[in-house]
């Protein structure tokens, strides 16, 4: 379906957390990024707030076919990318990156950036410029 997507930052491969997970799991950076996309896609279809009560780290490890991956996500610094406790797992800041509201914000941001980049759709660079031009025309009349 065209509306099913997750937000991935262009700088994902450059993040120190990726290096940390790679070091802890023995995977390449490419493998870590691919598996993270699978984890985040799965989580996006399972939760709206990032909390997965009753889900254990082994579930994530099974989904991405690599034991210890969930615990590696929980050990990233400066902030863990996964929280694990006796109740289940939680994806911190999930709503900022996933879910309907995050998708709506990302689409709006993309639309605004596109609009600003394409100046032919704008009357002026700013509201101040537009008002200035309008008053200049009035004075000329």
Image (cartoon, rainbow, N blue to C red):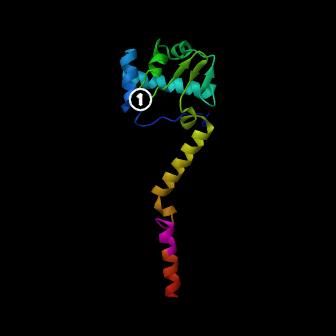
Question: Does the magenta stretch mainly form a helix, a strand or a loop?
Answer: helix
Residue 87 position, x and y percent, is 61, 17
Residue 129 lies in the magenta-colored region: yes
Residue 8 vs 86, above or below: the answer is: below
Q: Which element carries disc 1, helix, strand or loop?
A: loop
Residue 109 lies in the magenta-colored region: no
Residue 90 position, x and y percent, is 57, 24
Dot 1 alpha-carbon crowd within 10 angstroms: few under 14, some 14 to 19, many 20 or more:
few
Q: Along the line of sight, which residue is nearer the eye, 96 or 100? A: 96
Residue under the point 62% across and 38% down: 100
Q: Quadrant of residue 57?
A: top right
Q: Along the line of sight, which residue is nearer the eye, 2 or 49? A: 49
Q: In which quarter of the image is residue 5?
A: top right
Number of callouts: 1
Quarter of the N terminus within the rendering: top right
- Relative to 131, 78 lies left or right: left
Q: Name the residue under label 1.
A: 78
- Relative to 19, 119 lies left or right: right
Residue furthest to the bottom: 141
In this picture, which residue range is highlighted in magenta? 124-131
Residue 120 position, x and y percent, is 48, 63
Residue 133 position, x and y percent, is 48, 76
Residue under the point 36% across and 18% down: 23
């Amino acid at each position: 379906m065209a509306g099913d997507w997750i937000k991935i930052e262009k700088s994902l491969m450059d993040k120190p957390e990726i290096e940390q997970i790679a070091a802890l799991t023995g995977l390449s950076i490419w493998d870590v990024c691919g598996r993270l996309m699978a984890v985040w896609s799965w989580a996006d279809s399972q939760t709206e707030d990032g909390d997965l009560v009753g889900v254990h780290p082994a579930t994530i490890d099974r989904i991405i076919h690599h034991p210890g991956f969930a615990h590696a996500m929980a050990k990233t610094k400066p902030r863990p990318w996964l929280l694990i406790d006796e109740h289940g797992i939680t994806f911190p800041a999930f709503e900022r990156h996933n879910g309907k509201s995050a998708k709506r914000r990302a689409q709006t941001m993309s639309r605004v950036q596109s609009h600003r980049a394409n100046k032919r759709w704008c009357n002026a660079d700013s509201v101040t410029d537009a008002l200035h031009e309008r008053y200049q025309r009035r004075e000329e009349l």
